[in-house]
Amino acid sequence: MKHLNITVKGKVQGVFFRKSTKATADQLGVRGFILNEPNGDVYIEAEGDDFAMDMFMDWCNEGPEYGEVTSVETHEGELKNYRNFEVVKRRP
């Protein structure tokens, strides 16, 4: 299991990025959360096995149809054992 803190930059708010990312995470069995940052970025904490996380990162670099990802920053962190993947308003 791997835990990643992910910041996605670009046109990622107002394009269903959070909703689409939750659907992708649910399909892959990735757990954690996603939220909009005040500066226009999207912040994600995600946990899953190596294969699921690789696929999830591919999604984060692509984004939804109307989004435009310009960069993705990732940092490994300690496992927090999230139970599911949620769209939240602020960091838990």
Image (cartoon, rainbow, N blue to C red):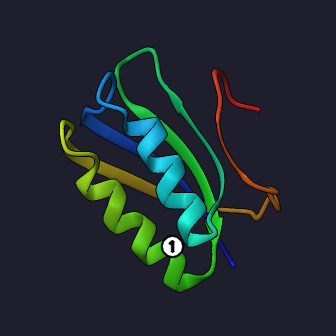
Residue at position x 54%, y 45% from top? 44
Q: Amino acid at mark 1?
A: Met
State whether residue 64 is above or below residue 11: below
Tell me which corner region of the image, top left, top right, bottom left or bottom right, holds residue 65.
Answer: top left
Q: Position of residue 45 (x, y in %)?
A: 60, 50
As drawn, the residue found furthest toward the top would be: 38
Residue at position x 33%, y 25% from top? 13
Q: Is residue 22 left or right of residue 8?
A: right
Q: Secondary structure at mark 1?
A: helix
Residue at position x 63%, y 69% from top? 29
Residue at position x 34%, y 21% from top? 40
In the image, 20 versus 62, the foreground residue is 20
Quarter of the C terminus within the rendering: top right
Image mark count: 1
Q: Position of residue 79 (x, y in %)?
A: 76, 64
Q: Is residue 65 left or right of residue 42?
A: left
State whether residue 58 is above or below residue 12: below
From the image, tell me which residue sits under label 1.
53
As drawn, the residue found furthest toward the bottom would be: 51
